[in-house]
Image (tube, rainbow, N blue to C red):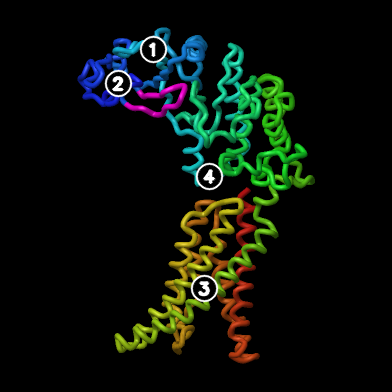
Amino acid sequence: MNLCINPDCQKPQNIDTSRFCANCGSELLLAGRYRVTKEFARDAAYRTYEVCEVGNNTEKILKVSTSEKSLKKTASVLQQLNHPGIPKVENNGYFIYFPRNQTTSLHCLVMEKIEGLNLLEYLAKQDNQPIDQTLAVKWLQGSIDILQLIHSRDLLHLHINPANILVKPDGQLAIIGFLNSSRPENIAYIPPEQINHAAVPQSDFFALGRTFAFLLTGKDPATNLEIYEPDLNNKLNDTTWRNYTQQISPQLTHLLDAMMGSAPIERPADTQEILHSLTNLNLNINPSIPNPAATSKHLNRDFLLYWILATVTGGSIGGLIGFVMGAFINLIVSAATKNTTIGLAVGGATFGLLTGVAIGVMQALILRQSAFLVKKWALVTALGFTIEGALGIFAGNYGSESNFIFVPGVVVGILQYLLLRQVFSAFWWVVANISSGVVAVVINKAVNYFLGNAYSVFGSILGLIVFAMVTGVTLVKLHSHSK
């Protein structure tokens, strides 16, 4: 594909070998060396393209505008800089282009295309899990070094957000997006004074502060603005971005809050002040002083309570529906196959599937809201309960009598272990599932024996509570030991 950049051209697509646009006649080989291969974005001020430099097939970024001032100034500054985190511009990277039969010329700037994942893509690859504070500080220092360079030459970026910061293959950050116009989804990264066309260097600090708050929480201001915006009294709401961080230094949260101040005067005076704060940062957290920013994200007593409620609720609802559906399917399959064993196995599997789906989904919701995310938790939980439901008939757990000894919790524990071991050493998780499963069955049978079958539901719920308590405490301990 060879694109024409004439803004009035109705059919800009041309074959690769064309020298002039077949529709409007404009030159396609820009400055005698660049062919336009792709359009990334356009707005009232700029168009952004990908170009290929003929001769060496190097891909670069082209900015096109009808206005000279901002583009020429940016070109002049970037030509002077040689930093791996800033797109390079060659001395002849700025040029003027004249479309065919147009009175208005186009101002063009060709800059280096830096490879890497932007921060939105980077966090998405990690299931939106926050980065740790050590990496955050390293990246923040690198970003401030870049801002210090461009600010020292009287250039502001003004479009900093996660989409315009790249993680390069070597792990270092690069800031791109110079001359980008702000899209509606990025308004949360723009400070009030910039919206009022009164931008200052501290405007870049605001955007960078919100970007790193996003990295430390996984909560994008674009979709979670309520935890970043001050209320009418200029005090942060009760639920703030701090409540969504894992343990980080109070000094770091204070610095980011300062960078995100409502007015420029509330923010650091310059890049040197931020670098000084980062140099003197104490990354240790005093264990005698609770860190309120971390309480809602750690596996603690609140997590244990939610885990018990989720397990008991899921087990009760899923178990009730599963029992009814399992009994119904048991009758149908038994009649169809004239084999009660097959009917019991399919009925037991149905009971286990519906119970496992309910428990797995409820538990997965708690895990997602806590300190880590375990992929496919609901799936393996449902699979484990399905297998155990089918095997349970041979132990007399679903309407048959047998001398076969089946220990509940084995299959579920092993399948969940395969996921948990990716987060921390989780051998004891299997032991906890087996022991709590056995205890739950014993409690249920004891209630039936001493109180009668009329209390069977009570016995099942009591067994679920014990099962949830043992597994929940085990999960808390495993997580705390992995710190």
Q: Is 40 included in the stretch rendered in magenta?
A: yes
Residue 136 location (% of width, % of height):
60, 34
Residue 11 location (% of width, % of height):
27, 26
Quadrant occupied by the N terminus: top left
Q: Which residue is mark 3?
A: 318
Residue mark closest to the camera, 4 vs 1 = 1
Amino acid type at circle 1 is Thr
| Separation of residues labelled 4 and 1 (CA atoms) | 46 Å
User: Is the residue marked by circle 3 packed among few (<14), some (14-19), or many (20+) residues within 10 Å?
Assistant: many
Pointer 1 with pointer 2, Cβ within 8 A: no
Residue 27 location (% of width, % of height):
27, 14
Amino acid type at circle 3 is Gly
| Separation of residues labelled 3 and 4 (CA atoms) | 30 Å
Question: In the drawing, what numbered circle is on residue 104?
Answer: 1
Amino acid type at circle 4 is Asn
Question: In the drawing, what numbered circle is on residue 4?
Answer: 2
**Mark positioned earlier in the residue sequence (1 or 2):** 2
The rendered magenta stretch, by its main secondary structure, is classed as strand
Pointer 4 with pointer 2, Cβ within 8 A: no
Q: Which residue is mark 4?
A: 128
Q: Nearer the viewer, residue 129 or 450?
A: 129
